[in-house]
Amino acid sequence: MRRLSIVFLLLLSPMVMGQSLYQQLGEKEGISSIVEEMLYRVGGDERIVHHFDGVDIVRVHKLITEQVCDVVGGPCEYSGETMRVSHEGMGVTHADFNALVEHLIIAMEKHNIPVSTQNQLLAKLAPMYGDIVEQ
Ligand code: HEM
C-alpha cells in the first residue's frame, strides 16, 4: 500500500522520477522524433496541409525541434523567426491551431510521453497562440 502511494506520487510529480521536462521528452533526439511524427501527421491532414505548400519542411522540423528544446529548458538556442513574424499573413485559425496541437498530442502518445509531461509542454506553447492565430 505504501509502495503504491509512492508510485502514485511519482506519477503525479511534474519531475517524473526526478527528470527535468527536457529529459522527460527524451532530450533532443526524443523531441526531434516527436516533431517529425507531428509534421508527418500534419502532412496528411487536409484541414491544414495547405498552409505548408512550398514550405521547406526539413528547415521547419529543425526549427520547431530547436524551439521546443529551448522552451523546455534544454541546451538549445532557438535560431528562427519570432512566432508573430513567421506566421504573419498565413491566416492560421483557432481550428488550425487545435489541429496541429492534436497531432502533437498523438505524436507524444506514440512516444509514450506521460500525460503530465504532455501538459507541461502544451503549457509552454500556449502563450504563443496569440502570435500564431490571426482569425
Ligand atoms: C504551438 C504551435 C506552433 C509552433 C510552436 C510553431 C512553430 C513554428 C516554427 C518554430 C517555425 C519556423 C519559424 C521560422 O521560419 O523561422 C514555424 C513555421 C511555420 N509554421 Fe508554425 N508553429 C505552430 C503552429 C502552427 C500552425 C497551427 C500552423 C498552420 C496550421 C503553422 C504553420 C507554419 C508554417 C506553414 C511555417 C513555415 C513558414 C515558412 O517557412 O514560410 N504553425 N512554426
Image (cartoon, rainbow, N blue to C red):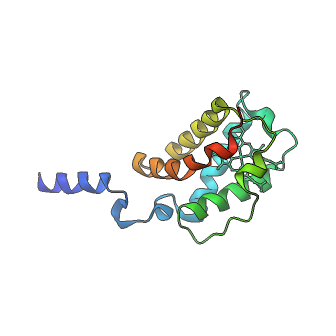
Query: Where residue 111 sits in the image (x, y, percent)?
Result: 52, 49
Residue 95 vertical position relative to residue 3 in the rendered view, above or below = above
Snapshot quadrant of residue 20: bottom left
Looking at the image, the residue that sits furthest to the top is 46
Looking at the image, the residue that sits furthest to the left is 1
Residue 122 vertical position relative to residue 69 in the rendered view, above or below = above
Looking at the image, the residue that sits furthest to the bottom is 75
Residue at point 64%, 37% (across, down): 97
Query: Where residue 66 sits in the image (x, y, percent)?
Result: 66, 62
Snapshot quadrant of residue 65: bottom right
Residue 72 vertical position relative to residue 114 in the rendered view, above or below = below
Query: Where residue 124 sits in the image (x, y, percent)?
Result: 53, 53
User: Is residue 124 toward the left or the right of residue 66 in the image?
Assistant: left
Quadrant the C terminus occupies? top right
Residue at point 18%, 52% (across, down): 5
Query: Where residue 43 sits in the image (x, y, percent)?
Result: 74, 37
User: Is residue 90 toward the left or the right of residue 125 in the image?
Assistant: right
User: Is residue 53 toward the left or the right of residue 17 in the image?
Assistant: right
Residue at point 64%, 57% (across, down): 32
Asked whether 71 or 25 is in front, the reply is 71
Is residue 112 among what the camera can see?
no
Is residue 122 among what the camera can see?
yes
Q: In this figure, what is the number of numbered marks?
A: 0
